[in-house]
Amino acid sequence: MKHSGNTILITGGGSGIGQALAQRWHDAGNHVIVTGRRRQALDAAIAGRERMSAYVLDVTTASEVEAFARQVVAEHPQLNVLVNNAGVYSAEKIVTRRDLAQAEQMIETNILGPIRMTNALIDHLAAQADAAIVNVSSGLAFVPYPAAPTYSATKAAIHSYTAAIRPLHAGKVEVIEIVPPQVQTELTPGQSNDPNSMPLDAFADEVMALLHAPDTPAEVCVERVRYFREAEAKGQFDEALRMLAQYS
Ligand SMILES: NC(=O)c1ccc[n+]([C@@H]2O[C@H](COP(=O)([O-])OP(=O)(O)OC[C@H]3O[C@@H](n4cnc5c(N)ncnc54)[C@H](OP(=O)(O)O)[C@@H]3O)[C@@H](O)[C@H]2O)c1
């Protein structure tokens, strides 16, 4: 992925990982467009920064995604990078019957969102030089968390989708996956102060260093997520799953 001179659209860019990456990309000399549902968070993310723009967009509404894609391409014809970062997390107790509203919201946001955004922008991206799609998965894509089965499944799905489309776009659109470990954001209430989560700045700095290496890796894995990413290959999957089950 090109270091600077991109026009980058990042969903969920008003907070957490999205905001931290958006601001680092902007600092590196890129035009960055952030989207999300909360106007106030978006405005705070771009405050005082020229060459940053913000649009309210709910990725769970198919018609909104289509209309937004037409608008953003018209207003930013140089757009060449899509970052599918928006996501939601809900813990679940699935051993008894329950309301599925939160599970459905995770599937709509974490899987259908990126699929819809990619579909709406792929023709435009494929026509740009140095185009890239960056999808944000999770270490839980590789070892599922029994306390969050639907969330883990959405992240395994986005990993699979990302790997599947990579060869199809080879030579035209670079397809990159960012695999975060547990990071200090408000993905769950209070997590931004959790000492067991990776500090957000350290995570974002490590991601940027990997992204801007001479050859951007197809999967951007910070050191802290390698145990989960490599668990199956190293024969440690059952051990890792048992460890996560203790916290469920
Ligand atoms: N933090 C972690 O431990 C961790 C670990 C692994 C993976 N991840 C992934 O990293 C990504 C970013 O999460 P985060 O940790 O930075 O948490 P976060 O601060 O809560 O960020 C999530 C972002 O997604 C946006 N969003 C949620 N639903 C949306 C929707 N329907 N339409 C548009 N935007 C929506 C939110 O903005 P609005 O509320 O304004 O819409 C928010 O800015 C997610 O995909 C998450 O699954 C995080």
Image (cartoon, rainbow, N blue to C red):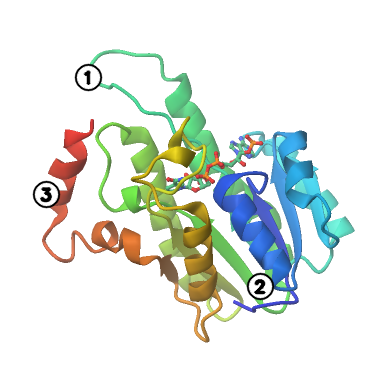
Labels 2 and 1: the sequence-earlier one: 1
Task: Name the residue tied to disc 1.
Answer: 95
Task: Name the residue tied to disc 2.
Answer: 131
Residue type pointed to by label 1? Val
Of labels 2 and 3, the one closer to you: 3
Q: Residues within 10 Å of mark 3 (few under 14, many from 20)?
A: few
Give how far apart the Cα atoms at labels 2 and 1 are. Answer: 44 Å
Helix, strand or loop at mark 1? loop
The residue shown at (53%, 77%) is 170
**212 on left or right of 163:** right
Question: Residue 15, how many percent across, how many down?
Answer: 62, 44
Give how far apart the Cα atoms at labels 2 and 3 are. Answer: 38 Å
Confirm or reject: label 3 Cβ below 8 Å from ligand 1: no
- Is residue 83 something one can see in this rendering? yes
Q: Residues within 10 Å of mark 2 (few under 14, many from 20)?
A: many
The residue shown at (38%, 53%) is 181
Give how far apart the Cα atoms at labels 3 and 1 are. Answer: 21 Å
Task: Name the residue tied to disc 3.
Answer: 238
Question: Residue 138, how many percent across, how many down?
Answer: 40, 51
**235 on left or right of 73:** left
- Is residue 122 something one can see in this rendering? no
Q: Residues within 10 Å of mark 1 (few under 14, many from 20)?
A: few
Question: Residue 209, how many percent across, how many down?
Answer: 51, 74
Helix, strand or loop at mark 2? strand
Labels 3 and 1: the sequence-earlier one: 1
Question: Residue 123, how many percent across, how many down?
Answer: 70, 64
The residue shown at (47%, 27%) is 104
